[in-house]
Amino acid sequence: MNEWKRSHYIILSEIIKDELSEAEELKGGKKFEIGNTISHVTLQRFFENDYQDKTHNDLRFLKTLDKICIFLGYKDLNHYIHSVRVKSQAKEIDDDLEFLTRIVYNYCATTFEFYKHFPEHKTEIFKELVFDGSPFLERTSQFSRELCERDFQLVTKNNRSNYEVFDIHLVTDEPDKKILETQEFWNLLFKVGETGEEHFVNQLNTQIYFIRKIDNVWKIWDNYNPDAGRLNRKA
């Protein structure tokens, strides 16, 4: 708008006049209440922000905002404000879900890397994603330690081991707690040290992630996996 000249505002004023003359919102009494024109001088002052703070509560200024909002396709100024708030809230929800989804994806990728290190037991790899002292970390540590002690090694050659996470959605949304449900497919092949004995994991299941906010930090606190520890029992 800084490059606009007086002639541009005159043209815009005429366009707004033509549009508002046909606007359903200005049929009847409202046309006489707020009018259906905006002068080029008013438009120039508006877009160049040439208003004093006290003007913002002026009735004429509010009427101008009403007409601009109608020109833009809204019913009135209040409708525009409501629409902006709804869009802002929707964006916050989308941003939250994207953030939480990233936590789950990163956890699964980290878990796969964790398996690659077997028989080394490197639970510190989860530090950024899972709370220390959480039930989930204790359980995961116990199950994985048993497999490492049995000298389990993940086979990744020719993509023999892989996983997929999909269909993530939010189940519970509270200020300090979020619960996500996922569908996960894990296809893993482990071989045991010198014997070469093979153990397969081939499972498609629904998992639940309990994510908490502690000291303003979001991490995984617990997880429900119906197949947790199955490999330990088979081994």
Image (spheres, rainbow, N blue to C red):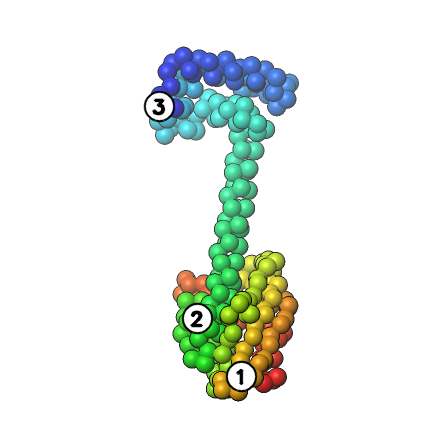
Question: For mark 3, what is the residue?
Answer: 2
Question: For mark 2, what is the residue?
Answer: 126
Nearer the camera: disc 3 or disc 1: 1
Residue 72 falls in image quadrant: top right
Q: Residue at x 56, y 72 (%)?
A: 188
Give 146 or 168, whichever is nearer the viewer: 146
* Element type where label 1 sits in the image: loop
Q: Say which amino acid is labelled 2.
A: Phe
> Any mark on residue 63, and which?
none
Would you place residue 202 above or below residue 37 in this image?
Answer: below
Would you place residue 174 above or below residue 29 in this image?
Answer: below
Q: Is residue 153 visible?
A: yes
Q: Residue at x 56, y 75 (%)?
A: 189
Q: Say which amino acid is labelled 1.
A: Gly
Residue 232, given in percent of the width and then of the height, sits at: 57, 83
Between the C-alphas of marks 3 and 2, the distance is: 52 Å
Which of the two labelled residues, at mark 3 and mark 1, occupies the earlier sequence position? 3
* Element type where label 2 sits in the image: helix
- Give the quadrant of the C terminus: bottom right
Residue 69, given in percent of the width and then of the height, sits at: 52, 27
Which of the two labelled residues, at mark 3 and mark 2, occupies the earlier sequence position? 3
Question: For mark 1, what is the residue?
Answer: 196
Q: Say which amino acid is labelled 3.
A: Asn
Between the C-alphas of marks 2 and 1, the distance is: 28 Å
Contact check, label 2 and label 1, Cβ < 8 Å? no
Give 109 or 152, whichever is nearer the viewer: 152
Which of the two labelled residues, at mark 2 and mark 1, occupies the earlier sequence position? 2
Give 127 or 19, whichever is nearer the viewer: 127
Q: Residues within 10 Å of mark 2 (few under 14, many from 20)?
A: some
